[in-house]
Amino acid sequence: MAWTSSPIPLLYLIWIGFLFSSGDVAASGRCIEKERKALLSIRTGISDAHEWLSSWKGKDCCSWAGVECNAATGHVIKLDLHNPGGPSSNKSKVNPSLLELKHLSYLDLRWNYFDGAPVPGFIGSLTELESLNLSSAGFGGTIPHQLGNLSNLLSLELSENTISGGIPESLGSLSELVSLGLALNSINGEIPATLGDLRSLQIMDLSSNNISGEMPGTIGKLRNLELLDLSSNKIQGVIPESIGNLSKLWALRLPNNKIGGAMPASLGNLSALQTLDLSNNQISEQIPDSLGNLFRLESLSMNGNNIGGAIPSSMGNLCNLSSLDAYGNRIRGQLSGFIEGMSRCRTSGIRYLDLQNNEISGPIPNEIGKLQSLTRLSLGSNSLSGPIPASLGNLFALSDLNLSSNSLVGALSEANFANLTYLDSLDLSHNSLTVNDTQDWLPPFQATQIRMRSCNLGPKFPPWLQNQTKLSVLDLSSNGISDTFPDWFWNLCLSDLNLNVSYNYMKGGLSSSIECFWTVIVDLSHNNLEGFIPRMDPMLTFLDLSDNLFSGPIPPAMAAGTDYLAFMLLSNNRLNGTIPSSFCEANHLEVLNLANNGFSGALPDCWNDSLALKIIDVSGNKVSGGIPKTLGLLPQLKSLHLNDNGLSGRIPSSLQHCKDLVTINLGQNRLSGAIPRWIGEKLSSLKVLRLRSNMFTGAIPPQLSLVASLQVLDLARNNLSGALPPAFGNFSSMISIQNETKPVLGEEGTYYTENIVVDAKGLKLYFTTVLSLVTSVDLSGNNLSGEIPEELTKLHGLHFLNLSDNRFSGDMPQNIGAIGQLESLDLSKNKLSGRIPSSISALNFLSHLNLSYNNFSGRIPSGSQLRTFTDPSIYAGNPQLCGPPLSDKCPDDAPSEIPTEASQEEDVDEDENGIIWVFIGFAPAFVLGFWGFIGTVMIDRRRRIRYIQFLDMICNWFTHR
Ligand SMILES: *[C@@H]1O[C@H](CO)[C@@H](O)[C@H](O)[C@H]1NC(C)=O
Ligand SMILES: *[C@@H]1O[C@H](CO)[C@@H](O)[C@H](O)[C@H]1NC(C)=O
Ligand SMILES: *[C@@H]1O[C@H](CO)[C@@H](O)[C@H](O)[C@H]1NC(C)=O
Ligand SMILES: *[C@@H]1O[C@H](CO)[C@@H](O)[C@H](O)[C@H]1NC(C)=O
């Protein structure tokens, strides 16, 4: 075997070839001297020619390799200079002496490298040329229009160069041309209508260029065309009706363009068609019935369009079809007509049927069991209903079965899989199936991928997996399994495994021998697993054990030993000990989430600039000591959550180098010192700054307002003093109204949802998905003094403002009503005075207001939204205030009704509305649909936060659809 693959025999064959083709014809001595000299000049331009043109010696040029002369006249008629070594990168040149070979009918320069030089226009003078092959030869420039003079040309091959510019109209004069190959260049412009004049053309390949415009209607004149390939261009418009005239066409390839409109019914006239590829365009409307006339059709691809309607029953006649790919359209209706038709074919050879991501409804027809050649059946993400027909078990050739995300019901029985010996990939996720839990059944197949997410497999861990020793993907998430991992599972020692058993009730520990698994992805989150975290395979890239009962320390070797680890998610467990400094060596780690465990001691201070960490969440632990200075060396850090710990000391100035920081949450620690100015000057991407409940002192730096992206500023419960800087009216992201739910983080946020708790409305509102909509300023519980700057009213997009429990004095900003999005306003416990400005009643979204314990005076404004605030306590401690809802009458008042018990009840309503206003303020269109649901649920104080989470969850669901 070895010798056949060495190059020597190949060259030998080629040499033999030349022996027959040239030696035979040209008698020695006939070579024309002028042409011999021309050949030698041509040779000087060809790189490496001395090696493979070594035979070019002596007088008899007709016997030289690659040269063929006319036996009668001695003129060189064929010149084959294709580089026998394959594509080369040594630069060559086309010598103009080529023009001396006036009788050339065959020229092949393939696989030389002409270094971006244009195809010489003078080739157009070689009018006897029949075959010109310049493919894969490094030509650039544009196609010379002179080629249109080659009236004898049968084959023009220019593919795989870097030719740009348009296709010259003159090519339409090549009336003998049989084959035109311009693929894999950078040709642009439209297809000239003149190409319709190529009456002899059989093959036209313009694929992989930048050709734009519509397909010219004249294409229908190419009556001899057998292959038309326009794939991967920028062709738009509709497919011309005239295409139906191409009665000899057997392959039509138009994928990866921008073709729109409906498929013309005339496609059904292409009676010779075997391959039709329309994938990845913008084709709409329904499949024309006439497609059922394409009796020879073997392969039909129309995936990635907007095709609607049902699959016409007529397509059931396509008995030669072996592949149908209609993935990702809007095909509706039922499958029965088509499948029943196919099942009647004497020999139905369909092997590949992909209708995934459509809107097909109805049952899977029982007749599917007759399509016994099927190797791939992909019907996922449709609206199929009813049971999985037992006949499916007959499809003994099936290797890939995907019925996920439908509304299939009933029990999966052994019969469903009885004969599926070759099944390799099985996806039944997201259906309402049940599995008949017979202990002794083992499937006949050895699959590499089993996805049965949300399939109701519990409560036992599926025993039938025992013999699956080849698995590399196993997804059993959300199945209600409440079992321990069986011993046999760990003994499978699967390799390259991507394991997802998340969202079950798995209990017990992980085997210490999990190391024998070669895992790449392990997601066991949201279970009741306990015990120590075992050491895992060093190839691991994704580990999610969050929301379990794991305890003990992180094995120190694990962080360092996992060279590929990118995501480590261990939040919400009972882990303790110190955070191992070996994380500083995990070069690929991007997300480290250790939130809500019992970690103590100091944070590692060995971080360096070669690390890829983007998200660090250590919130809710017991770590102490200072914030490590070396965190500032992490060049990609975007999100830092160290809140709810026992950290002390100052914010290290090194953090100013983390310019990509989006979130800083250091709340609930014992941090001190001043709030650094550089936060405003350097961290221009910051959206969330939460320093709440620490011991920060000094004034608020006005520079904070330079952060144009800041949306959540929480400095509450510190010892800050001085005035509120008027520059705070300049927060751009609070001036504009945020109305787009978009992820706060980039791709890394796929495995970590950015989250923040905002204290507002007397509640703790937990925001995740809708965080991008939240705007909040909370400076409560400090020693801030002076007036509240009027400039604050420029923040038209602000939702929550809390300045309570400070020493602010003077009037409330007169134009407070300009903060039009305000839902919660708390100015209580200050020394504010004067009248409450009447503009406050313009705050239509306001649902929480607290002005108590100030020195406001005069009549409480009424009207609009303000009328709904009937709880007098929100005005308490302002002895000079009067009017409803207070019982103190204003001096000029006539006696009015005192609020009664009834208004107490209304108060509850108002609070409920408060929550609902949160929804409305954030996502009006979406909420209207849910209003009915939310409106009917009793909300008590403990439940409110859940409703925000509920909203969050719904939005999450919305954005992931
Ligand atoms: C499996 O194949 C055998 C032989 O082809 C056939 O007799 C049997 O009915 C098939 N079983 C099912 C469940 O389709
Ligand atoms: C489950 O399997 C048993 C034994 O094979 C059978 O008797 C029973 O009918 C099956 N149940 C369902 C729901 O298919
Ligand atoms: C399944 O595995 C067991 C051992 O776990 C073995 O005895 C049995 O032969 C296997 N069966 C099949 C069908 O592979
Ligand atoms: C960690 O927790 C375990 C109990 O789960 C306890 O025995 C151990 O002392 C703790 N270790 C540390 C360092 O707190």
Image: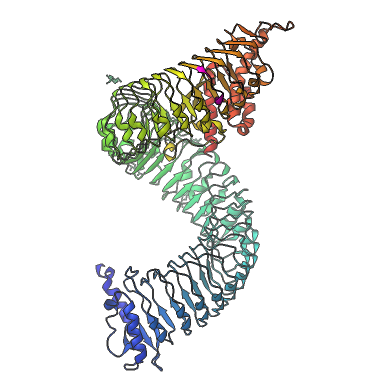
494 left or right, relative to 667: left
Residue shown at 36% from the left, 20% from the top: 672
| Residue 32 spot, x, y in % from top left | 36, 92
> Could you tell me residue 779's position as x and y percent?
48, 20
Quadrant where the C terminus lies? top right
Quarter where residue 605 is shown: top left
The answer to whether 899 is drawn above or below residue 463 in the figure is: above
Magenta range: 786-792
How many numbered dots are placed on residues in this image? 0
Q: Is residue 787 magenta?
A: yes
Question: How far across and down, in percent of the image, does residue 721 sit?
Answer: 44, 17
Residue 606 covered by magenta stretch: no
The answer to whether residue 763 of the structure is visible from this angle is yes
Q: Nearer the viewer, residue 657 or 183?
A: 657
Question: Residue 552 or 892: which is nearer the viewer?
Answer: 892
Q: Is residue 416 left or right of residue 852?
A: left
Which image quadrant shows ligand 3? top left
User: Considering the image in quadrants, where does the N terminus appear?
Assistant: bottom left
Q: Where, by quadrant of the figure, is residue 862 drawn?
A: top right
Residue shown at 55% from the left, 26% from the top? 791
Which residue sits at x=59%, y=68%?
271
Q: How is the image coloured?
A: rainbow
Q: Is residue 152 left or right of residue 114?
A: right
* Residue 589, percent from left and from top: 33, 38
Is residue 217 placed above or below 587 in the rendered structure? below
Whether residue 86 is situated above or below residue 830 in the rendered picture = below
Farthest-out residue, right? 894
The answer, for residue 535, to whether it is visible in the render is no
